[in-house]
Amino acid sequence: MPDSEAAVEIRGEIVVRLPEDYGMVSLRCALDTVEIEGALSRWAGTGMPGNGRFARTNKGSFAWMAPDELLLMVPLSELEPTLEAVRDLGKSIPLSAADVSDMRVLFEVSGTGSRDVVAKGAPLDLCSAEFGPGSFRRTRLAQVSVMVWMEKEPAIRLACRRSEADYVEEFLKFAATRGNPGFYS
């Protein structure tokens, strides 16, 4: 299991770290209804993110995962209130909400060359015109499924299954130490 306390600085320009203060809630429902869009907009204070996007709010952020699923990412201290608020929505709108925080591990790759590190294992176009702040994708990193998103330049966040966290951490460290091809930096 990756060391959650450690931030690994590689070559003085790329940092791989595991942010600790996060919780994740999987919300499944019919996202294309006026009721759910309105309820989520009132709760989050922003509109529904589109396909391949995530929205940052004063409560955290939420990402479009599938036509019937959103992933809410909130500070750990806000996890229980968020679950309670979302379940309250379920009293009037059919939905399912589950705490999936323990299921996934979050990584952040930051610094000059972070796009190149992720690109070494993910089949994504990470140029700034295609993948910038607010972008969210479900894809693969080498042999495992990951979620990849960018909140701000030049940091890229990835989440994987907890059982695959050691593999992802080693991949990111290895990719960061093997030189920068300079495609994106």
Image (cartoon, rainbow, N blue to C red):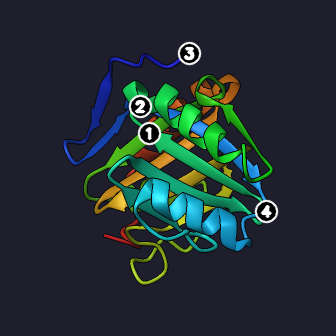
- Between 144 and 32, the residue placed more toward the observer is 32
Label 1–label 2 contact, CB within 8 A = yes
Residue hosting label 4: 30
Spot the residue most to the left. Answer: 12
Of marks 3 and 1, the one in the foreground: 1
Q: What element carries label 1?
A: strand
Residue lying at 67% horizontally and 42% vertically, measured from the top left: 26
Residue lying at 41% horizontally and 31% vertically, measured from the top left: 78
- Between 87 and 97, the residue placed more toward the observer is 87
* Amino acid tagged 1: Val
Mark drawn on residue 74: 1
Cα distance between the residues tagged 3 and 4: 36 Å
Please tell me which of labels 3 and 4 falls first in the chain.
Answer: 3
Residue hosting label 2: 78
Please tell me which of labels 4 and 2 falls first in the chain.
Answer: 4
Crowd band around label 4 with a 10 angstrom C-alpha radius: few (<14), some (14–19), many (20+): some
Q: Is residue 89 left or right of residue 148?
A: right
Crowd band around label 3 with a 10 angstrom C-alpha radius: few (<14), some (14–19), many (20+): few
Image location (x, y in percent) of residue 47: 49, 71
Cα distance between the residues tagged 3 and 2: 25 Å
Residue hosting label 3: 1
Please tell me which of labels 3 and 1 falls first in the chain.
Answer: 3
Residue lying at 62% horizontally and 40% vertically, measured from the top left: 88
Of marks 1 and 4, the one in the foreground: 4
* Amino acid tagged 3: Met
Cα distance between the residues tagged 1 and 4: 22 Å
